[in-house]
Amino acid sequence: MPTYRDEAIVLRTQRLGEADRIVTLLTRANGRVRGVAKGVRRTGSRFGARLEPFSHIDVQLYEGRSLDTVTQVESIASHGARLAGDYPRWTSGTAMLEAAERLTPIEKESATQQFLLLVGGLRTLVSGTHDASLVLDAFLLRSLAIAGWSPSFDDCARCGRIGPHRAFSISGGGALCPDCRGSGATSPAPETLALMGALLSGDWAAADASDMRCRRESSGLTAALVTWHLERGLRSLPLVERT
């Protein structure tokens, strides 16, 4: 059987039989991959602990008909242990893993940008340099942009009229000018749209200086954008503790 080696983040695991697991990975070169890790639930498993969610690994698999098989694993970074003691960061990280899986719907389709974004997002989350809620929202907005659904937070999303504009429409693609505003558009605070633009562009100085009211409004709009484009919400998002 042909084998291949890749760098990956463990997104999810499922029990299989008495001792095996199905492991869902987001890899650098091969996109989202599902593989069977045989015997990893036994006490004497060589690499069971390395195949937990949040783990950044170097992995070797051989190709199968429906599922590949994990044959070797080397740990690069174990983020799960560092996130487990911090509930807001753990839940934010869980939402990031779920979003990464949902935004890579086709197995083995290249998703290098999404992989690199997830690696960077988890490192930032673990470092504690920014509020976990901000890191999550930045990750979600940038993930949507990678998928081709980047919203506008300044110029009109429909006609391109130079902004800023007060109206914002989830289905309309973001900020709308008065002429393009239709039913269902909301009027978030200008500071909220500025915060979302900062998160999308990576302006952390502006994001860190935002107030709590804008962060809450930004999180609500970000969740609504994700739900609209994925056609159903992330199951882990309601569990995220917003501080």
Image: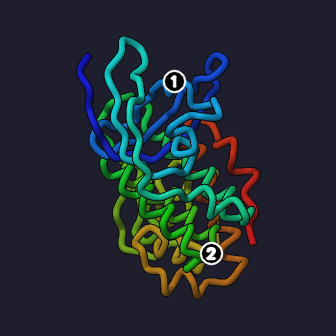
- Name the residue at 41% across, 41% down: 73
Residue picked out by circle 2: 131
Q: Secondary structure at mark 1?
A: loop
Lower sequence index among marks 1 and 2? 1
Position of 143 relative to 88 (above/below): above
Type of amino acid under label 1: Lys
Q: How is the image coloured?
A: rainbow
Position of 124 relative to 129 (above/below): above
Residue picked out by circle 1: 38
Residues packed near mark 2 inside 10 Å, few (<14), some (14 to 19) or many (20 plus): some
Q: Is 44 situated left or right of 29 in this image?
A: right
Q: Nearer the viewer, residue 80 or 219?
A: 80
Type of amino acid under label 2: Asp
Q: Is 41 situated left or right of 149 in this image?
A: right
The quadrant the C terminus occupies is bottom right
Residues packed near mark 1 inside 10 Å, few (<14), some (14 to 19) or many (20 plus): many
Q: Is 176 situated left or right of 209 in this image?
A: left
